[in-house]
Every structure is written in structure tokens, then in C-alpha cells.
Image (spheres, helix red, strand yellow):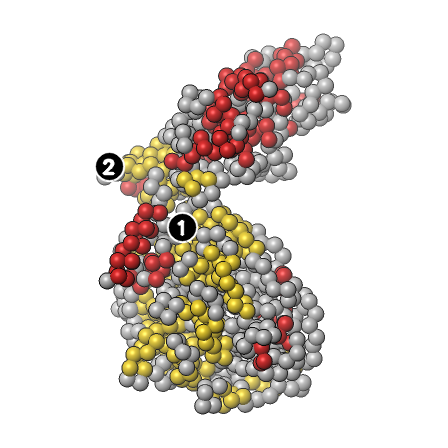
Amino acid sequence: MFLTAIFTLALLLRQHTFTPDETAEGGRLFQSNCASCHGSAGDQVPGVALMSGKFRRASTDDEVARIIRNGIPGTAMQSFNFTEQQAAMVVAYLRSVAGTTTASSDMPALGDTSRGKAILEGKGQCLSCHRVGENGSRVGPDLTSIGAPRPAAVFFGPPPPAPTPAAIVQQLLHSLLDPDSEVAPANRTYRTVLKDGTTITGRLLNLDTFTIQLFDSKERLMTLQRSDVRDFALLKSPMPSYRDKLTPQELSDLLAYLVSLK
Amino acid sequence: MKLRLAFFLLLIAGAIYGQQVPFERILNANREPQNWLTYGGTLFNQRYSLLSQITTDNVKNLELQWVLQVRAMDGTTKFEATPLVVDGIMYVVKPPMPNYEVVALDAATGRIFWTYTYNPGEARTCCGRNSKGVAMQGDKLYLATIDAHLIAIDAKTGREIWNNKVESPATGTPIDYSFTLMPLVVKDKVILGPAGGEYGIRGYVAAFDAKTGNEKWRFHVIPEPGEPGHETWEGDSWIHGGGSIWTPGSYDPELNLTYWGTGNAGPDWNGDPRPGDNLYTCSVVALDADTGKLRWHYQFSPHDEFDYDSTQVPVLADIEWQGRPRKVMMWANRNGVFYVLDRATGEFLLGKPFVKVTWMNGFDAKGKPIRAVQTSTSGVLVYPGNQGGTNWYNPAFNPRTGLFYIPTWEETSSVFTKTEQEFKPGTVFGGGRPTIPVGLTPLNTYARTEDEGYFGAIKAVDPHTGDIKWMYKMSQVTDSGVLTTATNLVFAGGREGYFFALDGRDGKLLWKAMLGGQVANGPITYAVNGKQFVSVAAGNGLFTFALR
């Protein structure tokens, strides 16, 4: 059982996960190609609810993608000239709307919480940038309740369902393995070079026509006048990928601890 | 020498743990006048600043730097919060309309770094969903809410660290206990108390561990059977005795005493069900800061029937008194009388009306007031009126001019009519009604005053005699606090919407600005990179000025 869990995680480490941009692209493809029959909510064909997370004729994501590309002979469901990647992004979109990023069997295995805590505080050196409760640095995103579901904000209309536990785990794993691929606006790091040569690096809190507001690497809230600034640039995430830094077992333990932080 | 070493070690400890505002900074707040670390600037609550860039000569050159907007107020909720300023960052709380928003902003530009939001649960507030500000110690801000929560917030990130519901006494209903004050930080404790005296609560002052939020001590304003002072109540009247805490206390580190003003007894306007002095309502209590034990008290309004809450900030000063230095407390009370007490012993040193007063006509040998009027079911006219000669708005003391500045309501009176009333949970426990001296309109503005015989003023009192040295007269009354500086300036405002600067020596008007809404907080002053600012709330905005 334990070995199976590790094997599942190892598979996941190789599997592609979808960024919000990719999922959004899937949404655009769906709305421009599929919504004319299925409706924008995916429920206009009687008996078919594409955004429910369940598909009548497919049990895996690959099967759904295959139906999109090949159609269903003898029905109104035509084939679409999508690449595999495009079809997969449409599925990712349907999953995200349903609140299930993938079939539940894809939930990565969670290891030991107390070992994960030790990794976070020790080998992982996570507290040099992150904070849990009152321990650690405030420079990076606060992890105190990182395992709690956070529904996406919506501009109008009912909020989407909160992410499932599996989706939270996937998201955390994605951040651990590929931290720079998706950084929330509130967590983006910028380098500011002033005209006098001073360089200030920090998280961007706010900016307007005249000022830039940062939380700098020394945990200071500061305002810079744009008239004093020579260069202002988004940096790659300072967080390293843990793909090669931790073993699958250690990642599994760390995930277990992170999802326990609520 | 030992003290110096200890202080040095504490500084080192603060540096090691990286705490931004260890208590030693608050204790010595007068050494860093560029910051504003407590409600009244220091633990003495004089609201006196040593900053000297803005003077009586150049104050006319003040101009607006920035404005912080909040959601629209209703008629009773006002922008009462005093901001804190720490190393260029201002922390201020917007009133809960409907949510609290604590913001950290750049004190020089007004731009917000972060916002913390809290949606309070059900709360019954007699007098507005108000907040007088957040306190700070270490890296934490402390917000006390109208649904009786004490919340710790990370001052650097705005993240909630803990959020504790404070247990209420089993008197009245829990929603009647509301916090509207800025808590007071003393050493490792956060101290506060609830409003709710209009609903039959049993008031208290309680201290909480600044790190964990766990309660460390509690002083009940109304003593229970067996405790000293309980004999000033009859029967079960003590259970709903009131004694709200509306404003923060003060602290004397040498005496290790923390001083708190207490609110009215319940029912407000009929003392018949509660014969006796009704300790410790309408009083100042001096509590041991470590244990909460009562060291002394002085009751300004024994057996109050006129809603004369002692809801003022105790102002502490070391002054010469009759030829020798003395640790005193100065107090302009809602009951219209200015007091000077010895803050080590509670000894009554002076009491003199600062507005028209008819409820008393002098003091006995121990400093207890001699009551001059009795309430009745057919009504009795009393000066000052129900809102008092002053109220919760902070006064200021300027050691340089030697004067104590009071925002006053002049010539106001009420007709108090008492009625019988039994306590019913969830209803106003008033026992009568006063006529309201000054009308309130729905538009957050106020009805005519001056032509009806009453008006507002800023008054300067000589604390050695209680004599009025000067008065700056306004057409309407005021809910503004007062700020004074080492350059002899006095800043205040009023319901008319003006914010102004006076010469603290003679009350002459030096500068004014129309802010378009009533001033209902205490102004503060601070400096960022050598530039002095003055900040005041009026209507729905916080307005910040500096020299052009």
C-alpha cells in the first residue's frame, strides 16, 4: 500500500498539471466551440451536464479528450480539430468549473504530517521565506492556513464551489515542483532600481501613477516614488523547485503537513 | 545603573526577536515624537507632542496632503479612531459599517499597504458602531470589537494571528457587551473593558496576555457580595449595575498603576432601585497592572442619575503642587467639574466646575460632592445636560503652557424625568428620560445651537486653580479631541466641520480648514523623514496636513 502511494506520487511528479492560464484557455475554447450546442453552462443538451464533474461516456480525462477530438458517431457530437493539448485544456476547464481538477483517483498520496513539519522547518528551509503561525519569515506567502480551501473570487454571479481536497493537494504539489509557473499577484517579487543605484527587492503590494508600495526582503513596508525609480521588473519566483531537492517520500510528507494547515 | 543595564538588555532582546514595538518603546514614547504609539501619544495620555516644525508663526501654511476615505456613517457612528504611527506607517481602523477595516498605510502619502477585514457578529451598541483605534505591541496590533472579540493582527502583513471571544459576565445578554475603545498595552498585557451600561451589564476591566490572548486578570466595576464596595448597593441592584468602560486607561510605570474611568450606574436616570453611592460607577479606579487589584478609587458622581459617565481618558502629569513636585491626575469630567487628584493615593486636591453646573454645590472635607438636586417623576432641570460638560473626547495637557485644554459643551441642560423600570434583558435599562440638549438630524449634521442658548468651546484651564484662562467659542458643540504641541499650538475641531489651530497661550485662532463633516476623534501629529504631519478625522475621512 505504501509503495503504491509512493508510486502514484512519482507518476504525478511527471504528469503535467494545468496552470490557470491553460485552464482559462480551455474555457475560451469551450465557449467558442462547444457552447453553441452545450450552452455556456454545459447543460443545454438533455441528460448531459458537462460541468458536473461526471461524464456519461467517459470515466477518465483522456477519454473525454478523445471524445472531443473524435466526436461520437451517430450523435450530434461532431469531432473537433483540437490538438491533444487543446482538448486536455478544455477538460481541465470543465473539471475546474466542477471543482474537481482531475478524477479523485489522482489524489497524490499524503505522507506523515509530523515528518512533513520537520522537513518544512529543517531540510526544506521553508521558514527562511514563509511563515507558519508566528514562526518564520513574512517575506514569502504565509502558510498558516495554506491547506484551507479558498474559493476563487468572482466579479459577478455565484462563486464557484470551493476546491476539493484533491485540488488543494494538486495545487500545493504544483507550487512545490514548479513554483515559478504560477505566482498569485499578491506574491510576485519585483526588483526596483532607484536612480541612485539602490536596489530594493520585495513583494509588490500596490502601485499607482506616482508610487510603488513593496514589502521588502527585510520585512519593511515601504513606498517608492516612481520619479526616483530607474528600473522596475518582475523577477522569477525566488522559491526553488523541490523536484530534485526532496525525495518523493519527503514531498509526500511535506504535502501531508501543508494540507493540515487550516 | 542596574536599571540602565536592564533596559539595555531589553533593547538587545527586542533586536534579537525583531519586535518592532517592544513595550520599552511605548514606555518611552516621548523620546520618539515622530511616532504616535498610544491613544494619547504616551501612557500619560497628555496628547502633547514635542514636534516643533509647525509653529504659531507658520501654522497658517498648513495644506492638505492626503485623505483616507471610509464608508458613510449613520447619525451615531462616527470616525472616532485615533491612528497610531510607527516608523512611517500609520495604522487606523475604519468603523464597522458593516465590517471593520484595519489598514496599514504610508503615513506620508496615505497609500494603503494592506487591509484586514473583520465582520462582527450581532452586537447592541447604544451609541454607534464606533472604534477608538487599534493598539500595538511587538509586531501585533490589537483590535477590540463591538461583538466582544479581541483580535491580534500581524502589523507587517495584516494577517489575523488570533481572534478570541472575550467571556462576558452572566448579566444582561452577551450582545450587550461591546468594545468601542482602543485597548491599553501595559508590559505583556492588553487591557480593555466593555460598553453596555445602558443595557444592564456588569462592567469590568480585564487584562489579556499580549502573546496568546489568554485572560490574566479581571476587575469587576460592580463589587459582588463580600467584596469591599458592595455595601454601596442594595439587594440585587448590583447585578445590573452598569459601569461601562468607553475609553482607554493610562499607566504610571513607577507606581505600576493603571487608571480607568468608569461609566454610569444602571438604570441610568433613576437611582431609587439602587440606594447608595453605587461604587465603582462614575469613578476612576487605580489598579495594580500585574494583578488587577484595586489600589484606590475616587468617585466623581456618587449615586449618579444624570448619565455622567467618567468616560474620559485619565491625564497624568508630574507638576509642582503647592510648592512641591507631585504626581497628579487631571480630569475634566462629564459632570462639568475639573478635578486634580494625587495619582499615588487618590487624594482629592481640587475640584472646580468648568461649565455651568447645578447638580452639586461644592465638596465635603473628603472631596465628595454635595448633591444639590433630586430627581423626580415630574422632571428636574439640571446643568450640564445629559451629554455633559464634556464627554469621551480627549482633553490635552501642555507642560509648556501649563494649561489643560478641554472640548466643552456650554450652557447645556436637560430635564431629567425618572420612571420605574424593571430590568428586562435586551431592552434599554434607563429608568427615565432626559431631554436631549442638542438636536440630531438624519444627515450627520446637527441642529441649531447658539441661537438657542448653548454652544461649544475649547477651554484652557489652569490646573493649579481650576480657573478658566481662555475660551475659544464655537457656534455649535463639539465631539473633537484636542492636540497640543511644544510650540504652544492647540488643534481641535467641531461639529461644524472646521479643523483649526489655536495659540495655546491665549486661544487666538491661527488657522482653520473646512473639512465638510464633524470632527469626532482626537487629532495626532507625527513626522516622516523630518516632515511634520497633523492628522484628524472628520465626517467620512481622515485628513492629513503638513506645511506647504
Q: CA distance from mark 1 to mark 2?
A: 31 Å
**x, y percent for residue B132:** 48, 62
Say which residue appears at 36% left-offset and 37% top-offset.
A202
Up-down relation of residue B261 to residue B271 (above or below): above
Quarter containing the N terminus of chain A: top right
Question: Circle 1 sits in a helix, a strand or a loop, which is it?
Answer: loop
Of B264 and A64, the residue lying toward us: B264
For mark 2, what is the residue?
A197
Q: Nearer the viewer, mark 1 or mark 2?
A: 1
Is residue A156 among the parts visible in the rendering?
yes
Which label was assigned to residue B139? 1
Say which residue appears at 49% left-offset and 90% top-offset.
B361
Do callouts 1 and 2 mark residues in contact (Cβ within 8 Å)? no
Identity, as a three-letter code, of the amino acid under mark 2: Gly
Have a look at marks 1 and 2 and say if they share a chain: no
Say which residue appears at 47% left-offset and 75% top-offset.
B284
Identity, as a three-letter code, of the amino acid under mark 1: Asp
**x, y percent for residue B222:** 57, 73
